[in-house]
Amino acid sequence: MNLTLLIIIIALYLLAIAFLGWLGYRKTKNAADYLVGGRQIHPVLMALAYGSTFISTSAIVGFGGVAGLMGMGVLWLTALNIFVGIFIAFVVFGRPTRRIGARLDAHTFPELMGRRFGSRFIQGFSGTVMALLMPLYAAAVMIGGARFLEVQLKMDYQLALFVFAVVVVAYVFFGGLKGVIYTDALQGTIMFVSMIILLFATYQFVGGWGAHQELTALASKVPPPLQAIGHQGWTAMPTFGSPLWWTLVSTIVLGVGIGVLAQPQLAVRYMTVKSGKELNRALVPGGIFILMMTGVAFVVGALTNLYFFQREGVIALAKVIDPVTKGPNIDKIIPTYISQAMPEWFGYLFLLAMLGAAMSTLSGQFHAIGTSVGRDLYQQAIARGQHQERTVPLAKLGIFVGFVLTILLAAKLELGIIAIATALFFGMCAAVFLPAYVSALFWRRATRPGVIAGMLSGFGAWALWVLFVHAKESSAIGLSQLLFNVPTLAGKTVWAVVDPIVIALPLSAIVTVVVSLLTKPPAASLLRACFNGEAPKAEEAAAPAEKVGV
Amino acid sequence: MFGFGDGWVAAAYVICIASTILCVVYGLLHWNVDDTFPEPVHPADEDLEFEVEV
């Protein structure tokens, strides 16, 4: 790559981003503008912003690398991304979220939950969980961007990480959500064009439609250690019930595919549109966008094996051996393929796309971290609704702290971690928030104690499973080793590869339902305000704020 | 089917495309179906005022 040309291109790109961030900053006049974009965002902008926040370098570089390892079975995740993450999310969840959010004047996802159930604890707890664990997901995205810079520019990874992070935090810090949505839309457009080119070029390189058959025939080249855990080739699912099957289905597909419904930084996007019409219209660009992002990344990821085999007689894993650990780093499969297979001009374009993909997601994540700290944790849970003027400054402080945590994690996490860290966060969101979110929108009998019990049990089960059972994390964290002298309590059983979501989500849902049915139904005034838009009568709204919430 | 090694992967491939078509068709059919969202009944940036069970 021509470094001078690259610097000029990136500088122009960053200028455009800075301009859009400034535009958002100029139009940010109050807390509502900062938090939900004044609820007047255009549907195409909203869809592009939702899509580019949803799809990051984690999806393209991280999960594309997973496809390079596991094959096209990962396409089940794309199917869920589109059907659940777009169709169900917009059609089923979007409208009631926006409606109830507007009635309760909720500015953040935790605030929606807190106000729906009349509990500051729910808002504070949701905000705290997000603020603490979102950096894990943000770190995965950051790693994706930094790895691409590292491969393309042959730059030191730690330096790439730092450069990347500073640019992202600058415009999130100044722009709020309006700035974020404008920049997301530009980034979404660049990502879309890049992925179309990548798709057609890759099929052309590997022989067109017949490439699937050739890749199928390559199954015998799967390394024996992978065959032993269920790998049957790059165009077939792993053997049913094998460790690889559980990892693919429970962690990669279910964790992310279901978890997307309860992503606070995505749910807040519904609250930015003016009417239901915008949500319907956003489906059109939204569905196409996700197909072209994850669908293309996963197909290309799997086909990289064929590309490298046709030219060098090796599969993709052999191309990404880490010089230090001597093991493959699957996070480098897509960057290595782009660097080697695609023309130089595409490298520049794709680099901008990856910058955009990471920045758009990171901006949404940091925005969610900031509002969790400023509004949900401090203003509502700690200050009990007072000191509204401190919301935005504290949100910005939260962004800064989240940024530091993210950088530290991104610098320390092990190789090939992007998809795992992402799935872990998505699974946690599903376990903690999904039953509560579904109850908030669709089940009037759900009670505050029921939802709190469900959230706490979901979080507890998820945390215990991660710390002591799921081998990938428990062995890395080391608490199980410290306390019980084994890396995982599951030993060599299949439970060691079953994702926490499989246990924690059903438990959280069951506890929510059972406790709700065993406790007093919610107040009629609260339900009328949420579902009928009726302001509470004076005699019904008698409970002073200090006494509300757990 | 489509040169894939098993039907599950082929099914995923087809469902991806079918889901996208579903999104596009639904979005186009409901392009002008409006649903204006309500004004807040919860006073902006005020405390929670609804009666709730303890």
Image (cartoon, rainbow, N blue to C red):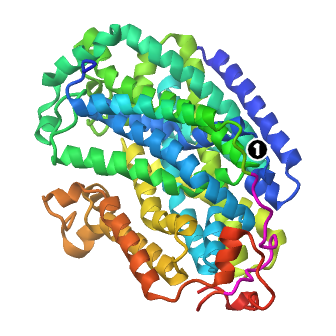
Residue annotated with mark 1? A41
* Frontmost residue, A26 versus A484: A26
Q: Residue at x 60, y 69 (%)?
A: A113
Is B41 colored magenta in this rendering?
A: yes
* Frontmost residue, B53 versus A501: B53
- Callout 1 environment at 10 Å: few (<14), some (14 to 19), or many (20+)? many
Q: Residue at x 71, y 48 (%)?
A: A172
Q: Residue at x 58, y 25 (%)?
A: A192
Is A403 left or right of A327, judged from the image as shown? right
What percent of the width, then of the height, locates residue A425?
Answer: 45, 56
Quadrant holding the N terminus of chain A: top right
* The residue stretch that appears in magenta: B36-51
Q: Residue at x 30, y 51 (%)?
A: A250
Residue A356 appears in the rendering: no
* Label 1 SS: loop
What percent of the width, then of the height, locates residue A318?
Answer: 26, 25
Asked where in the image residue A493 lies, by quadrant, the reply is bottom left
What percent of the width, then of the height, locates residue A187?
Answer: 65, 32
Which amino acid type is shown beneath numbered disc 1?
Answer: Ile
**A454 in relation to A539, above or below:** above
**A359 in relation to A346, above or below:** below
Instruction: Give the main secondary structure of the magenta stretch.
Output: loop
Is A183 left or right of A318, judged from the image as shown? right
Is A102 left or right of A407, judged from the image as shown? right
Residue A5 appears in the rendering: yes
Is A524 left or right of A154, judged from the image as shown? right
